Structures are given as structure tokens and as C-alpha cells.
Amino acid sequence: MKLSFACCGIECCSNKALMLDARVPQDQIGELYDGKAWFYDVWAYLTESKARERALELAEIQDGQSILEVAVGTGLMFNEIVKRNSHGQNNGIDISKGMLLRAETRLSKQNSENYSLSIGSAYDLKVGDASVDMLVNNYMFDLIPFNQMDRIIGEFKRVLKHDGKLILINMTKSEHFGGSLYENVYRLSPRLLGGCRGIQMADLLTRHGFKVEVREYVQQMFFPSEIILAAK
């Protein structure tokens, strides 16, 4: 199935044959990001901040919602979610203890106590069926092997309520000049790029029954990201 979106003015086709698979073993990801936690915010500010800001706009968070962020990282987006959902329920999980420590430090500066941060895996969400209004996931699927993505999307679909929102950001395939730079770095050294490579998620989400409402492309410091808003 091929999906086209006027919002980015191009055709977006998830053709695995044109995409690299994950090359860093999943059992090494937590340790890898433990080592990157101390400087991750600088990288994120230079290459990912515009995509996160746009994702927050698309999310249209309504105060009082139940929101789960999977792969919360250092809490850059989660911090903003808690501000906007001050009367709701906010839960963030990550597999990296180092990243979570940074997130906890960031969130401790807020007066709000309506959030939780904990170690957790996208493969096995400790959340009830149809209990989440919005699930947010940033820069994680670009670390996941293609043959494991279905399992995670199944978990996302399980925990989302009917008409629940899914907000995704990932490193994607280059669509503008210079965007292929980082994928070339990945080819040489996947760990140097944090295990991330360019992917496109819209088709796979559609095959799992999600309605992809928006897919946008953002490039910052030549780093290519896709932002997806999908409904269950």
C-alpha cells in the first residue's frame, strides 16, 4: 500500500528494500544511551527540537488526558507534556537508566506531581488495555529491527483508547539536500549515530489499522525527521 500526503508535498512509501535495518543489538541500546545521556540534550537541541515542537502542536493536548510517553529519553518532550496536562495522568518510560536520571532532574524543577518516570520496555507495556488517550514515541523505531516493529505497534494499539492519538517522531529517509549525511555516518558506524537510521512508518501503521492523519518532514542541521499523527 502506498500513501501520499499533501502536507509534505511528496510520496511517502515504506519500502524496506530501500531502508537499512537496525545494526545495534537491542540488548545494547540501554547501555549505549546511558553513555550518551550527558550530552544528548545538546544533540537534541541542534537536530531534533523543531520536530518535537511541531509534534507538540499536532498533539493538541487537552488538560486531563492520560498520556504515555515511550522512550522518554531525557524528558525534553515529557516536560512540556506535563506542563500542558497538569490535571491529567502522565507516565514516561525508558530502557536507559542514564536518560531517565536526566529526565527526573528536569521534571523535578516543576511544581507538578502528576507524573511518573520508570524503567520500561516498548515490547511489554505495563499499562491496561484501552487506558491511554495519547501515546508519544520519539526517535525509537529508528533503532528497532523491522521484524520487531509489529510487536511494538501491537502494544501501542492495545493500550490506546478508541480514537486515541499516536504521536511519532523518527529519523527518516532524506527528502532534502544534505539529509543523507547522517545515514552515511550510520553505514560507517551505527553506534556513533546512536543506532538510528532513516525509516518511514506510515504504511506499517496503516497495516495495523491506524489512521495516519498527518505525516510531515522536518530537516534541522541536515538531520531528517518525520512526524506522524495517527488515530486508532
Image (cartoon, grey):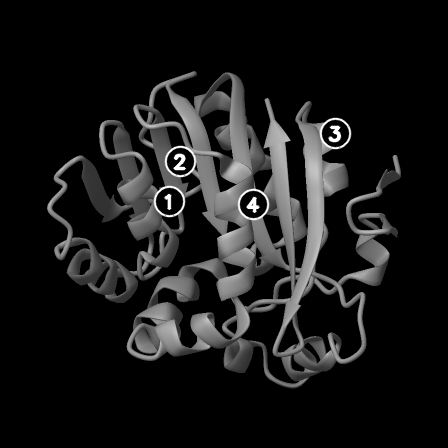
- Using the image as rendered, state which of residue 85 and residue 196 is in the foreground: 85
Label 2 sits on residue:
124
Of badges 2 and 3, the one in the foreground is 3
- Using the image as rendered, state which of residue 130 and residue 226 is in the foreground: 226
Label 3 sits on residue:
207
Amino acid under disc 3: Arg
Amino acid under disc 2: Asp
CB atoms at circles 4 and 3 under 8 Å apart? no
The quarter in which the C terminus is drawn is top right
Q: Please provide percent x and percent y for residue 110.
A: 15, 51
- Residue ID at (41%, 60%): 27
Going from N to C along the chain, the mark reached first, 3 or 1, is: 1
Q: Which disc number belongs to residue 121?
A: 1
| Lateral position of residue 36 relative to residue 117, left or right | right
Does residue 136 lie above or below 76 as drawn? above
Label 4 sits on residue:
168
Spatial distance from mark 2 to mark 3, Cα to Cα?
Answer: 21 Å
- Residue ID at (54%, 77%): 193
Spatial distance from mark 3 to mark 1, Cα to Cα?
Answer: 23 Å
Going from N to C along the chain, the mark reached first, 2 or 3, is: 2
Amino acid under disc 4: Leu
Going from N to C along the chain, the mark reached first, 2 or 4, is: 2
| Lateral position of residue 142 relative to residue 111, left or right | right
Badge 2: few (under 14), some or many (20 or more) residues near its Cα, within 10 Å? few
Q: Please provide percent x and percent y for residue 145.
A: 61, 54
Does residue 152 lie above or below 165 as drawn? below
